[in-house]
Image (cartoon, rainbow, N blue to C red):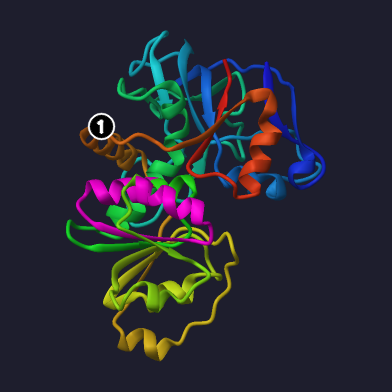
Amino acid sequence: MKAVIHKGMKGLAGVQVADFEESTPSVFEVKVRLKVAGLNHRDLFIPFRHGEHDPPVILGSDGAGVVEQIGEGVTNVQVGDEVIIIPSLGWEKNSPAPPKEFEIVGFPDHGTFAESIVIPAKNAVKKPESLRWEEAGVLPLAALTAYRALFTRGKLEAGQHLLLPGIGSGVATFLLLMAKAAGASVTVTSRSETKRKRALKLGADAAIDSNGDWDDQMNGEKADIVIDSVGRATFHKSLKQVKLGGTIVVFGASAGDEITLDLRSFFYGQYNLLGSTMGSSEEFLEMLEFINKHKIKPVIDKVFLLTDALDALQRLDDADQFGKIALKIE
């Protein structure tokens, strides 16, 4: 089969489309013939984490397709079922933090940027009929990450004000759509005027320039919750916009992960600082119910063929996208 693998040189220089041997499902496993996969920033990080002398690994954590073969003992799906892949491995129930055995599809085991994948049967759930293949294929990791950060950790409620720094990523667009569906008001930030305008069309109540004065642009209105995945470049600006006793949830650090914190100001402000990372299978099913109930559709930036995966990864690396980038496999 054709697959997007990393081997050898660190970074995108070591990524290539190559022929790769297909696998056969063992007990309690299924083989899925993939139709669409979705890109995440994780797919840019793995080529740096994967060892130069390690065996090749197939990238990709998001995917949807048709069950082609089932292993012994599988009862939850049948051959021919249209399924979406839960990217959480070893994290079944919602818990304060993932268990030690938690891993994500796509590393260290093989991922979804391929014509097929073998996964635990419990990680294949029936694709929502309301979603096209492109929408289902890009949904899993980003939507699950957004759901846990917003509701499990942030405990967002109707009527609250949410601030989203750095609109444009797949997770950020899901956060915007989910928060609006839950009855919150949402302010986004971006250096890009184009992205700010797109966010407003998507339902944001306000969009401010990340390079400008946030105090002036927020008009003195503070946020109940900030969900920040940018890191060092926005953390202190974000924290200044949280109302006393408010919450900041962090699930990424794309612009650096080291900050200094004025502890006295922090504890006098009674702020809550919470970490979050992806989510459990239980939360994934809750997330699917939520998007079905509110008829939420992923924002798709662009669809590439599997053979053009390097162009897709470069677009993601350049931060040109607004929403999710898809790989069409069939």
Most prominent secondary structure in the magenta stretch? helix
Residue in the picture at 39% in, 42% down:
143
Q: Is residue 187 magenta?
A: yes
Q: Position of residue 214 (x, y in %)?
A: 42, 74
**Circle 1 sits in a helix, a strand or a loop, which is it?**
helix
Residue in the picture at 33% in, 19% down:
76
Which of the 4 image quadrants contains residue 310? top right
Q: Is residue 154 magenta?
A: no
Which of the 4 image quadrants contains residue 80? top left
Residue in the picture at 47% in, 28% down:
137
Q: Is residue 109 left or right of residue 70?
A: right
Q: Position of residue 63 (x, y in %)?
A: 49, 28
In the image, 329 versus 67, the foreground residue is 329
Q: Position of residue 142 (x, y in %)?
A: 44, 43
Q: Is residue 306 left or right of residue 278?
A: right
Amino acid at circle 1: Asn
Q: Quadrant of the C terminus?
A: top right
Q: Is residue 243 above or below residue 176?
A: below
Res 79 visible = yes
In the image, 119 versus 20, the foreground residue is 20
* Magenta segment: 174-201
* Residue located beneath label 1 in the image: 292
Q: Is residue 330 above or below residue 135?
A: above
Q: Position of residue 233 (x, y in %)?
A: 55, 70
In the image, 282 versus 145, the foreground residue is 145
Mark 1, Cα crowd under 10 Å, few <14 / some 14-19 / many 20+, is some
Task: Name the outermost residue toward the top.
Answer: 80
